[in-house]
Image: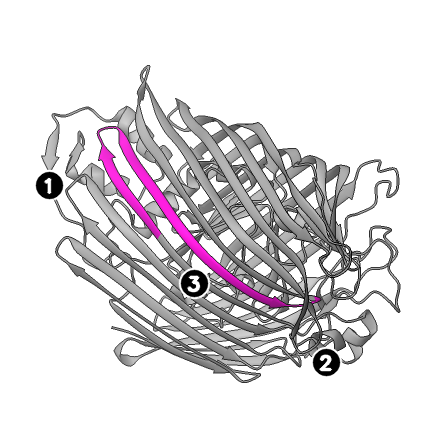
Amino acid sequence: MIRFPLPRAGLIALAAASPFAIATAMAQTTQLPTITVEGRPAPAGQGGGTLTSPPVAEQRRAVNSTAGSVTHIDAETTRNIYATNLRDVLQDTPGILVQNRYSQEVRLSIRGSGLARAFHTRGIEILQDGVPTNLADGSGDFYQIDPLALRAIEVFRGGNALPFGSSTLGGAINFVTPTAHTATAPNVFSLEAGSFGTIRGHGSVSRVMGDWDFHASGTVTHSDGWRAHEQQTLGQFNANVGRRISDRVETRFYFGAYYTDVKLPGSLTFSAAMTNPRQAATAAVTGDQARNTYVQRLANVTSIKLDIGQLDITSWVIHKHLNHPIFQVLDQDGWTYGISPRFTGSFNLGGYRNDLIVGARIFAGNNQALQFVNVGNAVRGAQTVNARQVATNYEAWFENRFFILPQLALTAGLKAYVAKRDFAGRLNMNTAPVTVDTGVTYSGVNPRLGLLWEPIRDVQLFANVTRSSDVPDFSDLTQTAAATTAFVPLKAQTGTTFEIGTRGRWGVFSWEATAYRADLRNQMLQFNTGVGIPAATFNAARTQLQGVELAGSVDLARDLTGHGDRLTLKQVWTWSDFRFVRDPIYGNNRLPLAPEHVLRTSLTYAHPAGFSITPSVDIVPQGAFVDYRNTFRVPGYALFNVSAAARLPNGGEAFVDLRNIADKRYISDFGPVVLYNAATTTSFFPGTGRSIYGGLRMKF
């Protein structure tokens, strides 16, 4: 049931407008008697939505109503490339550092979040359909995110992720899967293949059956890998089932199962990575290093429509088993579970429009962490660690948007949290056993204040200041140096971030641009302690992270052939200036890992008949420093690529994707060290050489 005081024609016009245009129209339109209309969601594939699954256009409007740096990506724009990991789907998004290491493992950082983390992620909340995929201690993986199973991607940088309850330096990325109401077609099947023995199959099916609907998708991937000992086999299954209980109540269940079997090629010295990049590290081969995960996920979102807003209650449980032979054999089994109610509403306050979000979250997890000596070929030797890790989090937040004028909104918000990390067990069992029963509790309050102004339709300017907190995870708190493991009670990383920016569309131009500065205390940084040993974490007293995030596009020409074709130039630029601040050891040195400039330029010719071709170049003019002493940089590079796509008869699509056409040798990622040594620093991952992929996709 929908109640509205505007004529039907006015509603149609407002449906495509921004929140500010809606507010302006409401202020300027004569109020008519209330009319009540009852209706059903639109059928699948027609852009309709439901309470738990809004249409993609509505999702985009909600994202763009944020008083800060955000990006909404329609996942259909990534279908014409071989999108195998997060770098492929985020490569046109500024401000996100995504560096390939091997197979699907990447380094993911936003504005320096978890910058030195050489594995997994920290400081960014990874969500799928608004449900956290991170473990309760904050650590996260990427393997369960299937690029072929996405409908949209929502990027909330830094404190702009507060509506999800996130107040970390990096913010949050929400990966939205389709439902039967938002899927582009009831049936989708694809087959892709390419270099290094790569083959991938995907299929999805969805239906609306009265008040019920369902969507299910599955993807299987195998690749021999570019480097030796880099084989991978992945299986990913996602499904959701929705039930419309009434006009005002809907519930949706999400199911997921993910299997990962990945061999690890290891890291090399700089010389080896540049002269013989396809080799694997000796330790990786002799230890048969690998990462095998088995994850199951169940979640529910129940939405209740109220007179002035909507209440969403989200609950989830995730089971994860990890078998991870590296410098030792890690065997972990754990559960994560939580519940989060959230109210969103819009109402009149003193004659002014006011939008409010109030949320809370209680989530926890336990993990049985075992370690064994890797005596070779992933064979378990003596047990070294038998520990239990328990993480518990209590969070509450609100964000309020008050319209001072129809085009000008003041945003204020706050998050309060308590995070407990308890650790108990036996360490160094094979040498000098130590029994540990300890823990640490973190708490804080993070406020936020911002402005959002839309002087004309589709052009926005914003500014805000946000307080952030990043709590250490168990990989930070339990550190291994040489053969000794210990619990290290690190401090939480805190900071204040200022940002100003704009986004919009005007004529042939579209853009998003943000400048920011974050002043941090106790930033968690890492450096490698030895060959194949995870990096140790320490707190840096003061650091300053600042930069510019820019993406712009312009239609250079339209109707070149008189048939509606278009030539579009797009530029993405990320500038990062990350430094210590008067550190007693490192002075004002730059932090390792983040290149100062990262650019991507692409030129797309698209014909309405369904053909497109996009040459592109990825440029890092000067590589990042490897060590905290700033004595050595990796070289810069330029990678040339081209992709093309064509629409086939009967709902078919085809694409071809050529990468690194010049077969450029470069360093794609590395682990930082205190002081670089050419002979002993073995922390470099060579970038993948020339490759080609292609695929066919059918929708019906």
Q: Which circle, 3 or 1, is nearer the viewer?
A: 1
Q: Residues within 10 Å of mark 2 (few under 14, many from 20)?
A: some
Instruction: Identify the residue at image location x=64%, y=72%.
Output: 264
Pointer 1 or 2: first along the chain: 1
**Tag shown at residue 77:** 3
Q: Is residue 466 visible?
A: no
Residue interval drawn in magenta: 299-327
Q: Which circle, 3 or 2, is nearer the viewer?
A: 2
Does the magenta segment cover residue 617? Answer: no
Pointer 3 or 2: first along the chain: 3
- For mark 3, give the secondary structure: helix
Q: Marks 1 and 2, Cα distance to the nearest angstrom? A: 64 Å
Residue at which label 1 appears: 38
- For mark 2, give the secondary structure: loop
> Which of 339/70 is in front?
339
Q: Residues within 10 Å of mark 1 (few under 14, many from 20)?
A: few
> Which of 13/514 is in front?
514
Prevalent SS, magenta region = strand
Q: Which circle, 1 or 2, is nearer the viewer?
A: 2
> Which of 400/260 is in front?
260
Quadrant in which the C terminus appears: bottom left
Image height check: is 456 above or below 353? below
Image height check: is 428 above or below 250? below
Residue at which label 2 appears: 279
**Tag shown at residue 348:** none
